[in-house]
Image: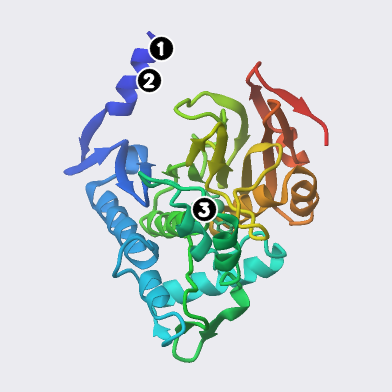
């Protein structure tokens, strides 16, 4: 009975002051399923504006779209600077800052290595070590020349390529949040394939219950849940995009030092903080750092919390999450760091 009530409330569409109100809307964009839930404040107009924003982000940052700004920068590598929109300029600039602050773990210039593996495509490959080493030598963000007078970006060496796949969803989620806030939305969930922003609270005085899913393909059970409000929760996990060859799993988060998928004891890292752009880059970077270094790193960033899930079904969290835990899946054990 409870299930039926929940379903009814989710699919309830009604009319209010002449405007169609929709609890949520699902879009396919940024290579993922995006679900925006604005409950009784969700008008057609706002959902349309959000759809436009998703399209815009795709057209700026998707390196698989030949006309995107990132593709233009990449195709002019070693030839010409490319004048870009303030959005692209700022995100590339921010990515370089994050490369420095994560000591190289987040690397926006990994394009040559990432496209070599073709992970997420129909025909992924395990490249040979020499080719990986050769491509890796083209992945130095020091060689990204940005000019803030004319907003141009130049990749200094032919063959260099930007890949903003580890930060673009965070940017888009923030843009959507800004649209919502400027339209007076006080309560909502922006979910761009696991890159989540919670606006406000479930109801006044009641924070949201945020769940982090079990890090397995095609399961949506929570491994852990905790209460929070006005936060972003961004997860990087190896179950999202991968392939298996000769019994070895190759996933989409790369170690910028080796050019191979990161090998450590983690299945996923979630970062919980105020800003989805940094949280997105940090979830990728902290995954690269691994449990020990990643935990030490995140503890030093004010207002930022993290949840680590390991291959041994252990969950490690920072203190701010630990004190707000609501539920832990019995298949997992909370461990102290
Ligand atoms: P995420 O799911 O946010 O962790 O992002 C993973 C995506 O970021 C991959 O699909 C790549 O496009 C890109 N990526 C992979 N490894 C890195 C890395 N070490 N630094 C920056 N971007 C990366
Ligand atoms: Mg990320």
Front residue of 153 and 143 = 143
The residue drawn where x is 70% and y is 41% is: 264
Pointer 1 or 3: first along the chain: 1
Which residue appears farthest toward the top when viewing the image? Answer: 1
Q: Is residue 243 above or below residue 87?
A: above
Label located before the other in sequence (2 or 3): 2
Nearer to us in this view, 195 or 7: 195
The crowding category of the residue bearing disc 2, from other C-alpha atoms within 10 Å (few below 14, some 14 to 19, many at least 20), is few
**Residue at image mark 1:** 2
Task: For label 1, count other residues whose C-alpha is less than 10 Å away and answer few (under 14), some (14-19) or many (20+).
Answer: few
- The tag on residue 127 is 3
How far apart in space, not on screen, are marks 1 and 3 (Cα)?
51 Å
Gap between marks 2 and 3 measured at Cα: 48 Å
The quarter of the rendering in which ligand 1 is drawn is bottom right
Judged by depth in the image, the label closer to the viewer, 1 or 3, is 3
Disc tally is: 3
Q: Badge 2 is on which residue?
A: 6
> Do tag 2 and tag 3 residues touch (Cβ < 8 Å)?
no
Disc 1 vs disc 2: Cβ atoms closer than 8 Å? yes
Question: Element under label 1?
Answer: helix
For the question of whether residue 47 can be seen, the reply is: yes
């Amino acid at each position: 009975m409870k299930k039926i009530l929940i379903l009814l409330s989710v699919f309830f569409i009604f009319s209010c002051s002449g405007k169609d109100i929709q609890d949520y809307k699902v879009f396919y964009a940024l290579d993922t399923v995006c679900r925006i839930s604005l409950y009784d404040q969700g008008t057609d107009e706002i959902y349309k504006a959000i759809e436009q924003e998703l399209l815009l982000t795709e057209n700026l940052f998707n390196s698989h779209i030949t006309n995107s700004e990132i593709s233009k920068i990449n195709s002019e590598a070693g030839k010409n600077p490319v004048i870009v929109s303030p959005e692209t300029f700022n995100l590339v600039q921010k990515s370089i800052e994050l490369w420095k602050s994560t000591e190289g773990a987040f690397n926006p210039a990994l394009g040559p290595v990432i496209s070599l593996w073709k992970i997420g495509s129909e025909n992924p490959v395990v490249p040979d070590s020499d080719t990986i080493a050769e491509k890796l030598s083209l992945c130095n963000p020091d060689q990204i020349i940005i000019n803030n007078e004319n907003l141009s970006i130049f990749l200094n060496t032919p063959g260099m390529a930007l890949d903003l796949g580890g930060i673009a969803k965070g940017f888009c989620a923030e843009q959507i949040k800004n649209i919502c806030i400027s339209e007076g939305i006080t309560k909502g969930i922006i979910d761009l394939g696991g890159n989540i922003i919670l606006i406000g609270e479930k109801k006044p005085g009641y924070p949201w219950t945020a769940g982090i899913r079990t890090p397995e393909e095609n399961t949506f059970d929570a491994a852990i849940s905790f209460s929070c409000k006005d936060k972003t929760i961004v997860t990087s996990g190896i179950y999202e995009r991968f392939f298996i060859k000769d019994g070895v799993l190759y996933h989409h988060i790369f170690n910028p030092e080796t050019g191979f998928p990161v090998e450590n004891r983690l299945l996923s890292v979630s970062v919980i903080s105020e800003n989805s752009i940094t949280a997105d880059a940090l979830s990728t970077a902290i995954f690269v750092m691994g449990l020990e270094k990643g935990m030490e790193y995140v503890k030093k960033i004010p207002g930022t919390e993290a949840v680590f899930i390991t291959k041994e079904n252990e969950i490690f969290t920072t203190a701010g999450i630990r004190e707000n835990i609501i539920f832990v899946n019995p298949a997992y054990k909370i461990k102290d760091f």
